[in-house]
Amino acid sequence: MTQRREVPGIRPYDGPAGGWGALKATAQAVRQQMELTEAPVVLLRTNQPAGFDCPGCAWPDKEHSSTFQFCENGAKAVTWEATSKRVTPEFLAQHTVSSLLELSDYELEDFGRLTHPMVYDAATDKFVPIEWEAAFARIGAALGAFASPDEVEFYTSGRASNEAAYLFQLFAREFGTNNFPDCSNMCHEATSVGLPQSIGIGKGTVSLEDFDQTDFVLSIGHNPGTNHPRMMGTLHEIARRKVPIVVLNPMRERALERFADPQNVVEMATYSSTNIASTYYQVRAGGDAAALKGIMKALMELEAERGNVLDRDFIAEHTQGFEALAADLDSTGWADIEKESGLARVDLEHVAQVYAKSKAAIVTYGMGITQHNTGTANVRLIVDLLLMRGNFGRPGAGICPLRGHSNVQGNRTVGITEKPSEDFLKRLEQVFGFTPPQGHGHDAVNAMQAMVEGKSKALICLGGNFAVALPDPALCFAAMKNLHLSVHLGTKLNRSHLLVGRETFLLPVLGRTEIDVQANGPQSITVEDSMSMVHASAGRLKPASAHLRSEVAIVAGMARATLVDSTTDWPGLVDDYDRIRDLIELTIPGFDDYNQRIRVPGGFRMPLPATERKWNTPSGKAMFSVFPGVRERYEPWPDDVLRLVTIRSHDQYNTTIYGLDDRYRGVFGRRDVLFMHPQDLAAHGLEHGDLVDIETVSSTRNLRLDNITAIEYQIARGSVAAYYPEANVLVPLDYIDKACGTPSYKSIPVRIHKAARQGAGAAPRR
């Protein structure tokens, strides 16, 4: 790289992921948010048998046996929830909603925990206190006044428990709608749609034990150090066994380069670390399909050259569609593969050679695969690669989608879906005595489009930050303000709460870390991790306020006030969550002896037929797919168009921003940056630190983000990256994977222009 000028807040970070930097950041998070005397007790209860499940990522716990089972970002998630800061009625009496909207997302959440149920008062432009029963009565009356149940959207965050999510879907379906937008629609819906088409189930097939036995890992489109950080311990163990870990990712991510395990005494004492990736290829954003097809084409060539590369017996016995895949690979040219992927043929051939030597392979992937126009097809390509060598249903092999929030998978398992199965609806009818709605409801994008058009008039949010998570805030924010009713269950203030409609309620909930006591005593909730393990979680902290209620209690309270003729014993379900689990067992396969099995440390695993080479597809076989061509987009782009990737900082989890640093990428105290390859900077007549304007291409709307500081970074040529959710202003709401509805946050066509105003001043630290 050329000599760079100094840019405020931009400086190299030379340390590994983890290590002393992680411990320092953890201590800082504790110091800023919690009482120092209670923090150690709380953190040591995280992911322990008698404690609570981390409210952060969904990576499973191995044995609950190490000294501590939390990571840096897990500690941030815990301290962020268990903060000593409070948003009281007195605080809200001093601030209008209009004034709060002028603050950053970080500032809003940093004010602390909501303590009382509140309702918006338009006359004063403030939130004012309301009693719980009065809130429920007003919500019930408002819901009952709509012409159709389908005018209401029921949104679910991935942090909701199985019990709360199940009651939420029961409430909505007895009310009469299948409108269930949820956070999975915006991240791993391609997995939920693509995997059933290929292997008959929408979940990953590997366990932690498989990682102990694998001899090859292909890591595509994810940044584990930030987004699923407890995975780093697993990758650390694999790398130290000298197992090849091949990475395909547009950006160089420190956690995939080297990691120092804070529980490794030698590494901590010697300031050393372990290299994670054995080989790191910077695939172009939106070039994953081309890269995967290149690897498979190289496998086919190896098979033709020497034989015994493909698992012919497995293919013959367990799959359909291989001949069509082989013909498509044969007709796909290497020149097109290289151009679209940004990788050389020799590199992709190297990956194929390493894969061909393995006896058991795992492919891990994240939203770098799913958040594209062809995300569903991308997922199926990964399955194709694994099927070619029979890497399902044997130890050390399989597919590993890396989901985000700690129960996003569990929510889907217990019924949070806009496309319910006929069998599930029949079971609900048999157990509860009402006829559920049969038609497909709205996913997240459909829900917002219906709100924009005025067809949906109400939004009930079980957690989350709905409008901020979605693309095109100009459209989404205006639609939120036109709602007749919005209800938000949450722990902290966020921007979606402030986009007030005619009636807006803030209902404060108990957090994952807090004791939940109901009529029959202290309660546990359950969650499902990304490897289909279901286990119990019980908070240990005193609630942040005596006025908080559990998600279960609030959902039941709204249901009771709305469904006046319901025969469901809503109060009884609140008294004892075992009763909710009994109902889940009656209506959802796989939950046999639910209450007994969650009382065993570690819980139990949901059925995964594909791990037994049983394929619940229409053909009864695992299905190969054909990806036409190599392009992950619906239209060609001119050569001057770059591909924008939206990313999270290391001080961030989804829309929650813990701070303004992103130390592994060398960004401190600011978020207003655009990561660019040095040659792309030069090609646009730019230098490191110049201000640029970004404009989306091929949009019916003029989407722009102006005065962003462009900085040099190790990112693939033709690709640029900016922080989410700030860069959502560049993502059209209808720019989606048409097969599953997920917005294409990871490959937005943009043009970059030098801004008229120059100067690299950092955004102020708040």
Image (tube, rainbow, N blue to C red):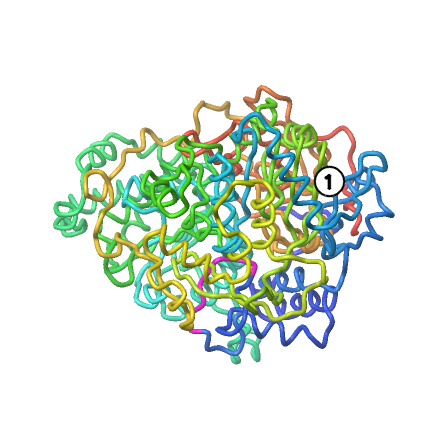
Residue pointed to by mark 1: 498
Residue 156 is inside the magenta segment:
no
Residue 56 is inside the magenta segment:
yes
In the rendered image, which quarter is residue 448 located in?
top right
Q: Position of residue 574 (x, y in %)?
A: 55, 58
Q: Residues within 10 Å of mark 1 (few under 14, many from 20)?
A: many
Towards the viewer: 710 or 394: 394
Can see residue 717?
yes
The kind of secondary structure element at disc 1 is helix
Towards the viewer: 407 or 205: 407
Instruction: Classify 163 as above or below 267.
Output: above
Left or right of 540? Residue 659 is right
Towards the viewer: 189 or 301: 189
Instruction: Classify 396 as above or below 747.
Output: below
Towards the viewer: 493 or 89: 89
Q: Amino acid at mark 1?
A: Leu
In the rendered image, which quarter is residue 327 located in?
top left
Per the rendered image, the range of residues in magenta is 55-63
Q: Position of residue 584 (x, y in %)?
A: 40, 54
Mainly helix, strand or loop, the magenta region? Answer: loop
